[in-house]
Image (spheres, rainbow, N blue to C red):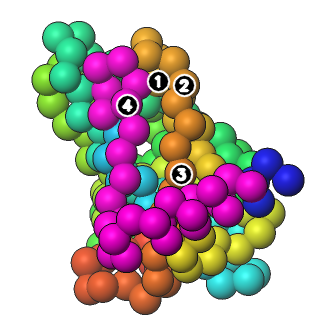
Amino acid sequence: MKLVSRIFAAALVLASSSALALAHEYRLGELEIGHPWARATLPAAKVGGGYLTITNEGAAPDRLIGGSSPVAGRVEVHAMEIKEGVMNMRPMSDGLEVPARGTLELAPGGFHLMLMELKEPLIEGERVPLTLEFENAGTVDVELAIVSARPSGDGGHSGHDH
Ligand SMILES: [Cu+2]
């Protein structure tokens, strides 16, 4: 119920702002979280990747250590790496540093959030609640904007194998 009402609220916001203004951002203390998004998934998909940028305006570093979402069994912080010519990813059990007065970028082909054990497909045009957890700043609720599953030629999450 909560999920539905939040999606409905997001739809209202979208409808009332200029049509293509999809950028959205959130603030948690000194952290600014920019445009969380994910690609739509096929109905049978069990995982999805989440991307966003985190800008730290503070003088002390922080760490993105995890997250949670009602649509996923769990959310992990992942890194991509090339091993013997094959793109692989691995969980970052200690999270990722958000440098002081710096930016951490989670993007296709690099660091990302992994929504594991998806309970429902990610549908283009919808927004999905996501809670981010930081070591020092605590937690913040954001929404992932779900975009077309078609990779736009920038690498993408489709080569993943779980
Ligand atoms: Cu991953």
Which residue is pictured at 36% across the width and 18% down the height? 29
Nearest to N terminus: mark 2 or mark 1: 1
At 26% from the left and 86% from the top, the residue drawn is: 153
The span from disc 3 to disc 4 (Cα, nearest Å) is 13 Å
* Residue at mark 1: 134
Q: Is residue 12 magenta?
A: yes
Disc 2 to disc 1: CB gap under 8 Å: yes
The residue where tag 4 is placed is 27
Circle nearer the viewer, 1 or 4: 4
- The disc labelled 3 sits on which kind of residue? Glu
Q: Earlier in the sequence, mark 1 or mark 3?
A: 1
The residue to which callout 2 is attached is: 139
Q: Earlier in the sequence, mark 3 or mark 4?
A: 4
Tell me the CA gap for discs 2 and 3: 13 Å
Q: CA distance from mark 1 to mark 3?
A: 16 Å
The residue sitting at 17% across, 11% down in the picture is 59
Picture quarter with the C terminus: bottom right
Does residue 90 appear in the picture of this structure?
Answer: no
Classify 10 Å Cα crowding around label 4: few (below 14), some (14-19), many (20 and above): some
Residue linked to disc 3? 143
Question: Would residue 82 be visible to someone looking at this image?
Answer: yes
Give the mark, 2 or 4, whose residue is nearer the N terminus.
Answer: 4
Within 10 angstroms of label 1, few (less than 14), some, or many (20 or more) residues? Answer: many
Give the magenta part as a residue range: 5-32
Type of the residue with mark 2: Thr
Task: Look at the picture and state if 91 lies above or below 41.
Answer: above
Determine whether, in the image, residue 103 is placed left or right of residue 136: left
Q: Earlier in the sequence, mark 1 or mark 4?
A: 4
User: From the Cβ of disc 1, is ligand 1 less than 8 Å away?
Assistant: no
Q: Amino acid at mark 1?
A: Phe
